[in-house]
Image (tube, rainbow, N blue to C red):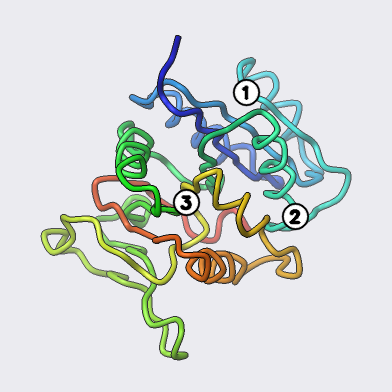
Amino acid sequence: MNNQPLVYVIILNWNGYKDTIECIKSLERSSYSNYIILVIDNASTDDSVKTLKREFSSIEIIVNDTNLGYAGGNNVGIKHALLQNADYILILNNDLVVHQDTISNMVKFSEKKENIGLVGPRVMNHNSDTIQSMGLRNIYNNTGSIIGKGEKDLRKYQEPYKVDAIVGCAMLIKRKVFESIGLIDERFFLYYEDIDFCMRSTKFGYSIIVLPSAVVWHKEMESGK
């Protein structure tokens, strides 16, 4: 019997099976064992569904009839994961490569405190030694900025720290957060829904943490093409 919390990894795909395949293969190398990969296909017009089913027999795939965008597409997966008694939901863009210890590190840290609601990784630019995001700050006074963007010196980012928000390309979210605040707001078809979700989570008393020891590499903008 596996005593690890169950993590549902939700990957939204839209005409991007090549990136999705690379993302899934990186997840298959994970040191964490109790996870399920769920691909939500947002009405792709290419061979995504056929190709993914051929490549991976162990993943779950839900095919939407129409493109529901980031919020609507992920909500389909979130609803399914909650029905399957997921303890955590890890939302990933399909154009990510995930370090083998990222899920393990994120879950282990999240389990430390009840009020930790969301955990984000260190997001690195793909094929680069520069940071893409280490969370967002000052989003409540209209001077919001992305922490660490473009920096190369990782020594200053060693310990976990609290932020106002994390970027939606990679978010580990506790089940109880959805039970408290609901799903992602579908009025946001694409962009800003992650900020809204984080702000709502904070209002309910959940902490949002960036964990530098959890690492992903992001091919920014590939998933939205």
How far is disc 2 from disc 3 in space, using C-alphas? Answer: 16 Å
* Residue 131 on image: x %, y %: 29, 62
Q: Is residue 88 above or below residue 126?
A: above
Name the quadrant containing residue 21. top right
The numbered mark, 2 or 1, whose residue comes first in the sequence reads: 1
Q: Residue at x 75, y 31 (%)?
A: 49
* Residue 140 on image: x %, y %: 46, 84
Identify the disc placed on residue 72: 2
The numbered mark, 1 or 3, whose residue comes first in the sequence reads: 1
Q: The residue under label 1 is which amino acid type?
A: Ile
Q: Is residue 23 visible?
A: yes
How far is disc 1 from disc 3 in space, using C-alphas? Answer: 19 Å
How far is disc 2 from disc 1 in space, using C-alphas? Answer: 20 Å
Relative depth, front residue between 177 and 172 = 177
* Residue 8 on image: x %, y %: 56, 33
Residue pointed to by mark 3: 170
Q: Element at badge 1?
A: loop
Q: Is residue 156 above or below residue 105?
A: below
Q: Is 10 on the left-hand or right-hand side of 44?
A: left
